[in-house]
Amino acid sequence: MEQKVNTRNVILDLLLDVEKGKMSHVAFNDKINRLMSNGIFLVKQDRAFVTRVFQGTLEKQIELDYIINQFSNIKTTKMKPVIRNVLRMSVYQLKYMDSVPERAVVSEAVKIVQKRKFVHLKGFVNGVLRTIIREMDNIKYPTEYPENLSIEYSVPVWMIELFDEQYGSAKEILEGLNESL
């Protein structure tokens, strides 16, 4: 009998592994191998979802934290790792994945928070995500350089400053890196 796996739980485990210092590709391969050794296989659609949300959340982490910090009275740096990463992966889905219904994102985030024994924070997660949904089109991004590029391209300010110093124009480099192949 095929076991059903909660893909968002898999994504959260992966994000927590990376936050603890594991390389993303190693974390991903280890998790898939662990699941398979327990007789759990991700169907193609689930594996694609896990890959996209995991990689997208990592790639857009600076922007996601910026968005969360605008609507949370607790900054992401002060949040418990589980809560921080549930919010990050949820905001990624809300902002970048039109195919995922908003109510499903919020509902699954709250379920994960409860399952991970943070029942007392389910209202916080629910409130932050619902506020972000309402305000997504009104988010104010920084206009000052280099913070504007840091958020737009989700790269640290120090890297923009290094690119400027070494190559003269961080924006051109970041645009080139951001182009689809």
Image (spheres, rainbow, N blue to C red):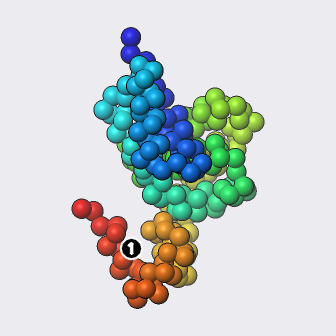
Q: x and y percent of residue 169 in the render? A: 40, 85
Q: Is residue 1 above or below residue 121?
A: above
Q: x and y percent of residue 83 in the render? A: 65, 44
Q: x and y percent of residue 53 in the render? A: 43, 45
Read off the residue under disc 1: 174
Horizontal side of residue 155 vs 72, given as left or right: left
Q: Is residue 155 above or below residue 172?
A: above
Q: Residues within 10 Å of mark 1 (few under 14, many from 20)?
A: some
Q: Is residue 97 above or below residue 44?
A: below
Q: Residue at (30%, 32%) from the top-left corner?
A: 44
Callout 1 amino acid: Leu
Q: Residue at (40%, 79%) from the top-left corner?
A: 171
Depth check, front residue: 47 or 37:
37
Q: Residue at (48%, 65%) from the top-left corner?
A: 154
In the displayed orientation, state which residue is furthest to the left: 181
Instruction: State which quarter of the image contains the N terminus.
Output: top left
